[in-house]
Amino acid sequence: QVQLVESGGGLVQPGGSLRLSCAASGNIFSRNVMGWYRQAPGNERELVAVMFSGGVKKYAEFVNDRFMISRDYAENTVYLQMNSLKPEDTAVYYCNCRTGPGNYEYEYWGQGTQVTVSS
């Protein structure tokens, strides 16, 4: 089992910045990917950014260089620095971890943190 605890959400004005953090604990295998998804009301959950254990990063197109994902491997923590936030970035942001032994992969989700971009 893996537990994910998110923090850092909140209310911010358009053009502002927020930094999300997700601390993972439990049985995390060396091969893993951690990242962030989001879900706005009435929409499906969508990928924002993920980072593989080898260092490769993947971003959604809408990020457009505004967000940056990073990891502290020693602390099993993943961060999402969000800049130039727009009202359409308003959503619940979920931390995600996929890991497992060999060819197996288990998926875990955090409880979500609300990000609201509004003036």
Image (cartoon, helix red, strand yellow):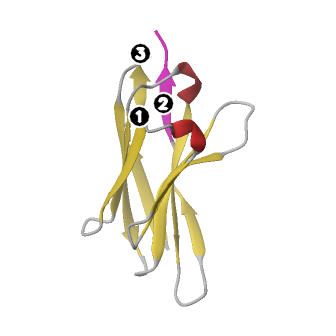
Q: Give the residue displayed 43% in from the left and 65% down from the top.
A: 56
Does residue 52 appear to the left or right of 109 in the view shown? left
Look at mark 2 in the image and give the residue it sits on.
Answer: 115
Could you tell me how far apart the alpha carbons at marks 3 and 1 are, in whole angstroms?
Answer: 13 Å
Q: Label 3 sits on what residue type?
A: Gln
Residue contact between numbered discs 2 and 1, judged by CB atoms under 8 Å: yes
Give the x, y percent position of residue 9. 41, 34
Q: Secondary structure at mark 2?
A: strand
Asked if residue 87 can be seen in this view, the reply is: yes
**Residue 13: mark:** 3
Q: Earlier in the sequence, mark 3 or mark 2?
A: 3
> How far across and how far down the image is residue 119, in percent?
46, 9
Considering only vertical position in the picture, is 76 above or below 102?
above
- Tell me, yes or no, whether the highlighted magenta stretch contains residue 117: yes
Q: For the residue carrying disc 3, how many other residues have a C-alpha within 10 Å: few (<14), some (14-19), or many (20+)?
A: some
Q: Which residue lies at the image location 32% right of the left edge and 65% below the top edge? A: 76
